[in-house]
Image (cartoon, rainbow, N blue to C red):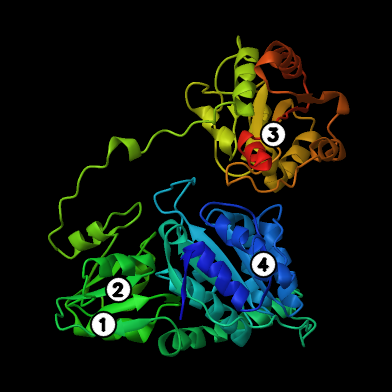
């Protein structure tokens, strides 16, 4: 069968389409963005009228997908790992209401924090919600597993979590595709109270979820994606999950590992397989990308005196990505000496694009703040976070999506004046609007900059939910229209912009300043 070259993200997207997908719901976040973008550009998806518009945030995406599952259709939800925090309320309760049509949640984790605030491990959410979790090792498994995920979602009538990592999401391999299935017909749940979480119903549904846990384990051992391969050398038993399994196999080009290997790609953990490995081997080595998730859990499964190596005991690094060399060192294999990385491809500090509108905004803000003490500007998540670095050094925080407004309010509550927030247009509609409402309700003396480059720039220029809506949103929330100012962030407007900013900084109430100029990268693509 002919193979197609796919990114891991693209393989998963095509697998979902071929599984009879009716809708994908997502907010862009690296390394998950390409899943939705692939579906948006797919002729197959267009012909099948597959919904693929971006959502305002991960919570709304999760809730919309639950609605599609309620109707009996198959729905996919995509986000990066920190997006799971935003979707957690709906995700956790989805485990209790269950699913009708297949419901698959994809979280793309970012070990080593290539473009993220942390390197949290989404498998914890699957365990937290008591849901099956799948972790592919390669692009073919991304394609095959998402179809399997939809099947077991409908078999057990529960959502299923899939966990990718950056290296898998953004690397390519050949993938064999299967004939596409047709989409489900609309069918409302037989139990019309299934999705009603009144306490009496919740208790019943929760007990039902608990009763399924043994079934999940048996299914993963007998019909799922966990495999135990025998080995002649019982010194070590190796447990490898996800892409760490690939790193293991790269140390054995002939694919012949001398030790028994348990490949884990499906959770809950396969208890019988782990116990069999533990009884046969002197020591266990756990290889996993992210947290020592398996390593911690198996210590409650195997006999207490068995030696278990992994990230906790320093056999593998506690933080960051794994790679074949680190895995080889853990196995005490001799590693080759590689050439140094050429200077031209060494990591370099990121910077704003030449001519970026944010440059003019930061210069104007810095000039307007002359005479004030430092440490009063609260930043947010986006390209403009680079304003914390030289040459601007304009912002003093970056915590989570939307935190700039609420942090500025908290600082103002403590007596800092003026307290300043800097947030992007897409981040504002993602999770900044509620913070602005908090500030309006108490007439907090803060100045909020909503940097409007008319796109979701940091993740590649996706549509922004804020497009042509920011002023009306601010007015609707209750900001005084006299203190909603729109600036043109260009060098020639510098003196005018500085004067407006200085005036608004003096105001003892909620002020919103909107520097508006289109992102240059988005503009270039439009011109092409």
- Residue at 77% across / 86% down in the picture? 191
Look at the image and tell me in which quarter the C terminus lies.
top right
Tell which circle, 1 or 3, labels the residue nearer the N-terminal end.
1
Q: Which residue is mark 1?
A: 277
SS at circle 1 = helix
Q: Is residue 168 depicted above or below 158 in this figure? A: above
At 31% from the left and 83% from the top, the residue drawn is 228
Q: Gap in Å between the C-alphas at discs 2 and 4?
A: 40 Å
Circles 2 and 1 in contact, beta carbons < 8 Å: yes
Label 2 SS: strand
Q: Looking at the picture, how far across and down is residue 293, in whole percent? A: 39, 65
In the figure, is residue 184 to the left or right of 152? Answer: right
Determine whether the residue tagged by mark 3 lies in a helix, strand or loop: loop
| Residue 221 x %, y % | 41, 86
The answer to whether marks 2 and 4 mark residues whose Cβ atoms lie closer than 8 Å is no
**Residue 323 placement (x, y as % from top left):** 29, 58
Q: Residues within 10 Å of mark 1 (few under 14, many from 20)?
A: many
Lower position in the chain sequence, tag 3 or tag 4: 4
Query: Which disc number belongs to residue 518?
Result: 3
Q: Is residue 16 shown above or below 389?
A: below
* Sequence-wise first label, 2 or 4: 4
The residues tagged by marks 2 and 1 sit, at their Cα atoms, a distance apart of 9 Å
Please rate how many residues cluster around mark 4, counting C-alpha atoms within 10 Å: few if below 14, some from 14 to 19, many from 20.
Answer: few
Residue 135 is marked as none
Nearer to us of marks 3 and 2 is: 3
Image point 69% across, 14% down: which residue? 492
The residue shown at (27%, 70%) is 249
Circle number at residue 239: 2
């Amino acid at each position: 069968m002919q193979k197609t070259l796919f990114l891991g993200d693209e393989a998963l997207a095509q697998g979902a389409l071929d599984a009879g997908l009716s809708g994908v719901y997502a907010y862009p976040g690296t390394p998950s963005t390409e899943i939705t973008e692939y579906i948006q550009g797919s002729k197959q998806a267009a012909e099948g009228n597959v919904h693929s518009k971006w959502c305002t945030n991960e919570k709304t995406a999760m809730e919309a997908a639950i609605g599609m599952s309620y109707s009996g259709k198959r729905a996919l939800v995509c986000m990066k790992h920190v997006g799971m925090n935003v979707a957690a309320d709906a995700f956790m309760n989805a485990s209790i209401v269950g699913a009708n049509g297949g419901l698959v949640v994809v979280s793309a984790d970012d070990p080593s924090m290539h473009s993220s605030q942390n390197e949290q491990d989404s498998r914890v959410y699957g365990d937290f919600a008591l849901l099956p979790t799948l972790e592919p090792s390669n692009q073919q498994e991304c394609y095959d597993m998402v179809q399997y995920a939809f099947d077991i979602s409908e078999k057990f009538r529960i959502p299923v979590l899939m966990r990718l990592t950056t290296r898998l999401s953004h690397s390519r391999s050949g993938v064999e595709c299967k004939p596409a299935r047709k989409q489900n017909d609309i069918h409302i749940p037989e139990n019309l109270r299934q999705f009603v979480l009144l306490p009496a119903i919740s208790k019943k549904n929760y007990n039902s979820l608990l009763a399924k846990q043994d079934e999940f384990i048996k299914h993963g051992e007998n019909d799922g994606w966990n495999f135990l391969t025998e080995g002649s050398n019982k010194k070590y038993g190796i447990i490898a999950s996800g892409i760490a399994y690939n790193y293991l196999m790269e140390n054995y080009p002939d694919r012949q590992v001398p030790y028994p290997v348990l490949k884990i790609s499906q959770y809950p953990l396969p208890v019988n397989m782990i116990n069999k490995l533990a009884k046969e081997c002197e020591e266990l080595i756990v290889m996993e990308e992210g947290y020592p998730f398996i390593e911690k859990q198996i210590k409650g499964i195997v006999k207490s005196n068995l030696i278990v190596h992994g990230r906790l005991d320093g056999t593998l690094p506690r933080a960051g990505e794994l790679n074949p060399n680190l895995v080889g060192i853990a196995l005490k294999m001799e590693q080759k000496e590689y050439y140094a990385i050429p200077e031209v491809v060494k990591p370099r500090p990121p910077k704003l694009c030449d001519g970026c509108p944010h440059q003019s905004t930061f210069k104007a803000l810095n000039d307007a703040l002359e005479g004030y003490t430092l440490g009063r500007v609260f930043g947010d998540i986006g390209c403009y976070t680079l304003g914390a670095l030289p040459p601007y050094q304009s912002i003093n925080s970056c915590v989570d999506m939307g935190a700039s407004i609420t942090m500025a309010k908290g600082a103002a509550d403590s007596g800092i004046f003026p307290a300043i927030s800097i947030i992007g247009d897409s981040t504002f509609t993602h999770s900044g609007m509620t913070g602005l409402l908090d500030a309006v309700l108490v007439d907090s003396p803060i100045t909020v900059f909503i940097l409007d480059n008319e796109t979701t720039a940091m993740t590649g220029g996706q549509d922004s939910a804020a497009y042509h809506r920011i002023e009306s949103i601010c007015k609707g929330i209750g900001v005084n229209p006299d203190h909603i100012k729109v600036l043109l962030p260009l060098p020639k407007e510098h003196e005018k912009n500085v004067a407006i900013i200085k005036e608004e900084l003096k105001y003892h109430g909620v002020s919103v300043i909107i520097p508006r100029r289109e992102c240059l990268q988005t503009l270039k693509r439009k011109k092409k």
